[in-house]
Structures are given as structure tokens and as C-alpha cells.
Image: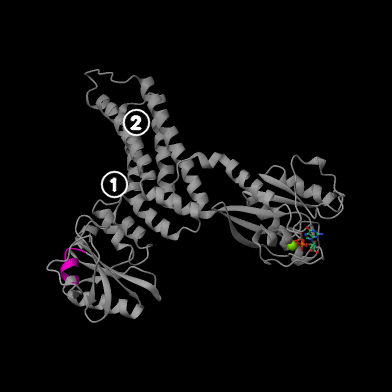
Amino acid sequence: MSSRAHLEETIVAIATPPGEGAVGIVRVSGPDAFAFAKKHFAPIRKVDLIPPFVPVLGDFDSIDQVLFFYYQAPRSYTGEEVVEIHGHGSPVVLRQIVQVLLKEGARLAEPGEFTKRAFLNGKLDLAQAEAVSALIASKTELAARASLAQLEGSLSRQIEQLRQQILEMFVYVEAAIDYPEEDIELLSQGQLQEKAEGLVKKIQEIRKGAQYGKLLNEGIVVAIVGKPNVGKSSLLNALLNEERAIVTPIPGTTRDIVSDTVSIEGIPVKLVDTAGIRDSQEIVEKEGIKRSVKVLEQADIVLFVCDASSEWSEEDQQIWKRVETKNSLVVINKSDLKLKLDDSRFDSPIKVSAEKKEGLDRLHQSLLSSIQGAEGLFSHEQYVVNLRHEEAMRRAEASLEKTLEALKEGLSGEFVAVDMRAALDDLGEIVGQTTTDDILNQIFSTFCIGK
Ligand SMILES: Nc1nc2c(ncn2[C@@H]2O[C@H](COP(=O)(O)OP(=O)(O)OP(=O)(O)O)[C@@H](O)[C@H]2O)c(=O)[nH]1
Ligand SMILES: [Mg+2]
């Protein structure tokens, strides 16, 4: 059945999280929402009509004293008749209210069905609807801010602009196909190419912003590596401000990967402590070291930790060789002890003492600049993309590149048009203009109930 067929039905759900709270909200939406709900509502102060958009205090049957909000269509979240009943946050009470409305003929809402209706009624486009669930799920302030920007249309605007530009060019290409004999050279080959190049650039820019969004959601992986006993685990604990990893004076203490996430200026940073890397024959340690090397290679940023109180060794050298080519920071730990390490070999090492908790602010600062330095990520408009968007953008970019190729090779308009049409469809998927029911259902089923 198509998604639209369900819009005749009135749906109901508890909109607040499960468990006890100061307030709990039951949300009803659909053609009969107001009719069903008002039958059971008795305002404290007698009114003839329950006014829309004004909270009214009263009793809902004899279940609870509630605030009754009537949002008249189309000025509601879903674009339909909506009633929100704000009761006291007892799960038992809220369930009873839902039961009453079910008896009236409403049915339980599916996950994300309110937002889906908002989409189907043109209140939000698909990227905005997805931003609602991203906003709810966001784990840091920055991620929340980016989700909000997307909810307000940041991604949709970019996509829409690009679609407009493609459409504009499409008209010229179509004209060349439909009226070849007229010989209307609306745009020269060179001009078309230039336009196509502009389109490729634009989608690349959007995808860069997308990387930033991904970073906000998934975070940056920072690996702490170095030879045994330099204080890697102590540094992890100091940065987390918690005794997360085992610290002992015995080299080779850490055997497995230990990690936890901190928020640095709103960016989730996953700190990964690793086993000290050295030539070991011991079977458990050997496996640990293998894992350390893998973490080192996959990390976004590496903290290379050395010991200020011991001389530069062959072991340091071996690890440094692996780290050198990566985006890395050199951390000289134990700087509370007498300096034996020749630190002039490094550009700008960061001196800290994990034990005395000294120099950590500077380390934070340096970490932040190297996160920001990566790709100039912060200069982009913000949106939180998910895999679905990413995939569609990737395809759109490929299609636009093919368009450009076709133009360069001087292929006829038909060929060019095919690729442009594909790019339009791919981009349309992001905002929901060319999205099948299956995809819609899949997207909204990941929402929570009541949203
Ligand atoms: N004086 C001083 N001692 C430190 C400092 N940081 C760590 N230590 C000591 O160094 C020893 C090793 O610390 P760990 O944090 O376990 O070192 P690690 O690099 O994780 O060692 P492995 O897991 O064996 O590779 C412990 O005895 C710590 O107390 C520091 O800043 N100053
Ligand atoms: Mg350790």
C-alpha cells in the first residue's frame, strides 16, 4: 500500500521517553484527532469552544489533569489536525490516555510516523525529516547544532540549488536534441563544459561539508602510541580524567586496546590507548602489539608518546618511522623528571606530565588545531549526512563527471542528457523527490515511536 493511503487514519502515541517524568505527552494526529480527544476533555473553566494554539487546563476523563493543546491543520508538526495532551509523567496514566483514544478509533503510531506525515504533507523534506532523528540522537553540542541547521534546510538548500543548476543546463541540452535542425546554438560546447565543471565542483563542495557532518557523528580517532612504559595509559587516564586503563611500572602492562570518547569543543574524540610497541616474543604481548600497529595505521591523528627521562632509543626510532607520515603530535611525557631526551629532533613537541596532570591544556589545544586543520573542515556549511545521503551524493558526482566527459568527447545531446537525468534523480533521493515507498518506510522505521 502506498504511504499516502494511511493518511486517512488518526494515529496516537506517547511522545515522551519511557519511564517517569515531570510531564508526559500523548500526541494524536489525523483527521479525527481533535474530535476524538475533545470528547474526553473537560476544561476547568467552562468554554464553549476549545481554541487552537492555546493551552487549556482540564481533566482528561478522570485519568489525569492535563494541558490540552490543539494545533489546527495545517499549522501543526504533521500538517494535520494534532492534539497534544500534556499530563503528569506517569507511564500508567499516559497509557490509559492512549487506550481511551484507541477505543475512539485511533490506532497506534508506527516509529517515526508523525515525522513521515510531516514529510508526506510537505512540511519537511526528507533530509530535514532525517535531521529530526539525527538531532534526537546527537551526542555532542556541535552535532546537535549541525542537525538543527540541516533541519532548518542547510543541506536541502544546497541540493536544491544544485538541482536547479542541472535543470537549467538540461534545458539547453534538450533543446539541442529536440531541435537539431533549427541549429539553435544556445550555448557553445565550451560554455556547456564550463557549466558542467561548475556542477562537479559544487557537488564536491557539498560532499566536503558532508565529511564534516560525518566527523561530528562518528568522531575523530586519536591513537596513543609509543614504546612500553612511556606513560600512554597514564596519558589516556589523564585526558579522560578517570582511571580507565591499568598503569604499572612494568613495561608491557597494556595488552589490549582500551578506548573511550571525550568531547573536545563539541567534537567527539575517541582516544585509543595501545600496547607499547617493541620487539616481543611473548605471545599475548605480540598480539597486542599487532593490534597497536593496526590502530596506528587507521587513526585520524596519532599521539606519539616519548619519555622525557630516558634517551632516544632504537625502539622510539622504529615507531617514529611509522608515525612520521601520519597526522601526528609528539608528546613528551614525564617532563616532571630530569630531561634526558634530546627533544630538538622534533618541530614542536608538547611537554606534559600525565602523572602531575601538567601541560594537558596545551595538548588539548594542539589536538583541536590538528582536528580543525584536517581539510579546513570548519569553514563549511554544516549538515549531518547519513550513509544514504553519502551514497546518493557519490552517485550524483559520478554522473556529473560522466556528463562532463561526454561533453568533452563531443558526444551527442542524448548521451549527455542520460547522465544529467541520473544526477537529478540521485539528488532528488536526498530530499525525497524521487524516493520509493520502500525507502521511505525503511528511513522512518529507524525513528522512535512518537516522533
Ligand atoms: N614521573 C612520572 N611518571 C609517570 C608519568 N606518566 C606515567 N608515569 C609512570 O610510568 C609508568 C608507566 O606508565 P603507564 O601509563 O603504564 O605506561 P604505558 O606507556 O601505558 O606502558 P605499557 O602499557 O607497558 O606500554 C608508571 O609507573 C607510571 O606511574 C609522568 O608524567 N611522570
Ligand atoms: Mg599502558
Amino acid type at image mark 1: Gln
Q: Is residue 264 above or below residue 164?
A: below
Instruction: Please indicate, yes or no, whether residue 277 appears anywhere in the rendered image.
Output: yes
The circle drawn on residue 433 is 1
Q: Residues within 10 Å of mark 1 (few under 14, many from 20)?
A: some
Residue nearest the observer in this picture, 4 or 85: 85
Whether 392 is among the magenta residues is: no
- The percent coordinates of residue 154 (x first, y second) are 39, 44
What is the magenta range?
30-37
* Mark 1 vs mark 2, CA separation in Å: 22 Å
Residue nearest the observer in this picture, 180 or 91: 91
- The percent coordinates of residue 100 (x first, y second) are 22, 78
Q: Report which residue position mark 2 lands on.
A: 416
Q: Residues within 10 Å of mark 2 (few under 14, many from 20)?
A: many
* Quadrant the N terminus occupies: bottom left
The picture quadrant where one finds residue 68 is bottom left
Instruction: Please indicate, yes or no, whether residue 409 appears anywhere in the rendered image.
Output: no
The picture quadrant where one finds residue 16 is bottom left
- The percent coordinates of residue 194 (x first, y second) are 40, 24
Q: Is residue 142 above or below residue 56?
A: above
* Quadrant the C terminus occupies: bottom left
The circle drawn on residue 352 is none
Q: Earlier in the sequence, mark 1 or mark 2?
A: 2
- The percent coordinates of residue 5 (x first, y second) are 19, 60
Say which element carries label 1: loop
| Tag 1 near tag 2, CB within 8 Å | no
- Seen in the image, is 286 located left or right of residue 207? right
